[in-house]
């Protein structure tokens, strides 16, 4: 078998196109992924129209002034703002494609916000306008999501500030202190101090006097108020953040970010194409070169011939997968300490994809037919494996799940995800891949007998 | 028999390739058996069973190793010398002419120095000059003691290069004998006419 393996490696070495596929392809893919992950997304250009008069750029909460411009900075951190002088100009910029979207803050926004946050309260809240180009659904979705999330953050920030101011007033009411209103300073006694004074005064009065009983009633009220208002900070905080969210991920450790999943998916995609095409093509080549008959005539058994092709795919998977991972690791954040798991994952995936490849190569007699069949089969398998639960009907998802389990892409993806991101136990997926390897080799053997 | 040259002739679909495949161990016979194991039979398929991306020497070396020949390099050198391809040993097979590729194809069949050599239409797709060189080579092998059995469509090749001729039709052996006996059976001086007459007489 080793001589046949050596022969295949020699043929590969003399096939510049194949070597190019094996070496350049993973390097290019991994460079693209690495650069994409390390640079992060570009800031989208958003037109910004602020129609609020300059003298209304602040609102007053109690005695404190809050600069609204400070909150718009939250948005500007995420976008590349393009100033527009009017709503019409912003609209034109969106239509012309100069910007991805526009945010218009109307003239009455500050006034309405002031009214809404006044302790008297008002239901008439300010409304900002978001303009985006609906002809590109993805772009529209991006702008909507971006501005919605940013406005939600601004709302939370303003809410927190209001809570802080209100809590300050409650504290003065409780503990006493000074505050300013309309340019005048006031000194407030505070309920705690009032209770102390009342208790002291009551103690100096005769035990059965009416005044003492009344003072005692007022003191008890002050005491009760002090005890209960002590919780005011927590209460206000809970109003500002009404619901606490406890995250409970189900399935895996929940440690996979979209970026690291993208790395695992791209490695598995590359391995699939390289290994399936290679194994299918090299087996078909034996028949295209008419060497198959000579080989199986006592020189090498069909099983060993198939094992050699699968091993070849596994051996080629190692440099392809590892080069990809090393390049990505140099550019983005990958845990180098898990390199042994990378090797296991890549090798198991390579063997399983190689086995699928020989099953295809055993059916097709020519390299071109084998390559076309391998390519045509691999893509839908990969797409099926990436269909998330809940996006299709339950029964259909079950069918997709079963179909995906019968091919190596899904278990390879799970194994690589576990190897890269410590997301779950990788061994069940590795065993699944090895089982598929044995099953596809057995199928290929039957196909070789039938079509050989 | 050592050194005997046997030609298998017959119309298309007669079963010539099937007979050679059965003898070579490529297919299993539904009845009967082959007295020699495949390892003692050299097999030269009709189409060159070679790797075009490898050189002549690499092809020979690969099959010598797979055949588990005791000294692969010596076997390769001997095969190169026998086929007259020593000067082209380093050339990639795809750069060789059809005739030379066929010589390499035959050389591979000879690597294990088999006492019996089976050739399936060895001269197909060769020009007259290449055919002459090929038959000279095959006749030389037989003279050296190798039993040679070849299938062919060319009746005159069978007449000139075979000691015995087998005529197959629809999987049936309808004649076995020398060229002269075939003439007599077909009742004609021209072997091709005699061959056709024999087929017609037997209802094929």
Image (cartoon, helix red, strand yellow):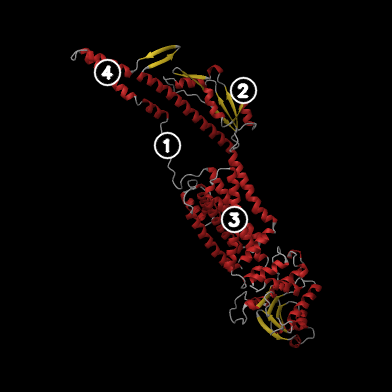
Label annotation for residue A245: 1
Residue A149: where, in percent of width, then height?
51, 33
SS at mark 4 in the image: helix
Residue B162: where, in percent of width, then height?
74, 82
Q: Between tags 1 and 2, which lies in front?
A: 1
**The C terminus of chain B, quarter of image:** bottom right
Residue B136: where, in percent of width, then height?
78, 78
Label annotation for residue A317: 3
What chain letter is assigned to the residue under label 3?
A: A
- In percent of the image, x 31 and y 16: which residue is there? A194
Q: Is residue B43 above or below residue A98?
A: below
Asked whether the residues under the numbered discs 1 and 4 touch, taking CB atoms below 8 Å apart as contact, a structural biologist would say no
Label annotation for residue A392: none
SS at mark 3 in the image: helix
What chain letter is assigned to the residue under label 4?
A: A
Which is more N-terminal, label 2 or label 1?
Answer: 2
Q: Between tags 1 and 4, which lies in front?
A: 4
Which is more N-terminal, label 4 or label 1?
Answer: 4
Q: Respond whether the residues carrying marks 1 and 4 are from the same subunit.
A: yes
- Say whether residue A37 is visible: yes
Which quadrant of the figure has residue A348?
bottom right
- Mark 1–mark 2 distance (CA, rounded to whole Å): 41 Å
Q: Which residue is mark 4?
A: A219
């Amino acid at each position: 078998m080793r001589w046949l393996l050596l022969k295949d490696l020699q043929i590969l070495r003399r096939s510049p196109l194949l070597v190019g596929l094996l070496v350049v392809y993973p390097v290019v893919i991994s460079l693209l992924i690495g650069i994409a992950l390390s640079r992060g997304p570009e800031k989208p250009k958003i037109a910004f129209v602020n129609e609020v008069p300059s003298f209304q750029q602040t609102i007053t909460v109690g005695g404190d002034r809050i600069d609204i411009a400070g909150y718009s900075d939250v948005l500007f951190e995420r976008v590349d703002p393009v100033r527009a002088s009017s709503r019409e100009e912003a609209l034109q910029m969106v239509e012309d494609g100069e910007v991805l979207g526009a945010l218009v803050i109307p003239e009455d926004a500050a006034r309405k916000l002031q009214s809404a946050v006044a302790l008297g309260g008002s239901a008439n809240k300010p409304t900002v306008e978001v303009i985006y180009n609906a002809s590109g659904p993805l772009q529209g979705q991006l702008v909507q999501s971006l501005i919605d999330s940013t406005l939600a953050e601004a709302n939370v920030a303003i809410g927190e500030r209001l809570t802080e101011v209100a809590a300050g007033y409650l504290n003065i009411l409780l503990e006493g202190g000074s505050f300013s209103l309309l340019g005048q300073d006031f000194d407030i006694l505070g309920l705690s101090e009032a209770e102390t004074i009342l208790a002291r005064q009551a103690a100096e009065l005769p035990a059965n006097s009416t005044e003492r009983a009344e003072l005692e009633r007022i003191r008890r009220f002050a005491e009760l108020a002090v005890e209960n208002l002590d919780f005011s900070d927590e209460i206000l905080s809970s109003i500002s953040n009404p619901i606490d969210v406890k995250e409970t991920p189900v399935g895996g450790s929940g440690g996979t970010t979209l970026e690291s999943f993208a790395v695992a998916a791209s490695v598995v995609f590359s391995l699939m194409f390289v290994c399936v095409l290679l194994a299918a093509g090299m087996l078909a080549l034996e028949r295209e070169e008419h060497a198959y008959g000579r080989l199986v005539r006592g020189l090498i058994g069909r099983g060993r011939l198939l094992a050699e092709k699968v091993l070849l795919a596994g051996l080629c998977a190692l440099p392809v997968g590892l080069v990809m991972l090393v390049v990505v690791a140099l550019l983005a954040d990958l845990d180098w300490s898990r390199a042994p798991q990378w090797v296991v994952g890549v090798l198991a995936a390579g063997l399983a994809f190689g086995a699928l490849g020989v099953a295809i190569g055993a059916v097709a007699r020519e390299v071109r037919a084998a390559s076309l069949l391998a390519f045509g089969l691999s893509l839908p398998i990969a797409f099926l494996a990436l269909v998330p639960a809940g996006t299709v009907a339950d029964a259909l998802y079950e069918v997709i799940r079963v179909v995906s389990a019968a091919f190596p892409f899904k278990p390879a993806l799970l194994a690589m995800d576990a190897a890269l991101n410590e997301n779950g136990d990788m061994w069940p997926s590795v065993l699944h891949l090895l089982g598929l390897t044995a099953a596809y080799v057995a199928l290929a053997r039957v196909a070789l007998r039938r079509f050989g | 028999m050592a050194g005997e040259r046997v030609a298998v002739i017959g119309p298309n679909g007669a079963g010539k390739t099937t007979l050679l495949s059965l003898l070579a161990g490529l297919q299993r016979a539904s009845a009967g058996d082959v007295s020699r194991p495949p390892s003692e039979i050299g097999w030269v398929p009709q189409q060159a069973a070679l790797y075009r991306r490898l050189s002549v020497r690499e092809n020979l070396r690969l099959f010598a190793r797979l055949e588990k020949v005791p000294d692969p390099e010596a076997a390769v050198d001997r095969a190169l010398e026998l086929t007259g391809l020593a000067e082209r040993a380093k050339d990639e097979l795809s750069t060789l002419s059809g005739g030379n590729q066929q010589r390499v194809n035959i050389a591979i069949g000879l690597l294990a120095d088999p006492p019996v050599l089976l050739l399936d239409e060895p001269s197909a797709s060769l020009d007259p000059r290449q055919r002459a060189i090929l038959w000279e080579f095959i006749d030389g092998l037989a003279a050296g003691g190798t039993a040679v059995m070849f299938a062919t469509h060319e009746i005159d090749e069978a007449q000139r290069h075979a000691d015995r001729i087998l005529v197959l039709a629809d999987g049936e052996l309808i004649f076995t004998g020398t060229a002269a006996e075939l003439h007599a059976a077909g009742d004609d001086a021209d072997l091709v006419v005699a061959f056709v007459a024999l087929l017609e007489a037997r209802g094929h």
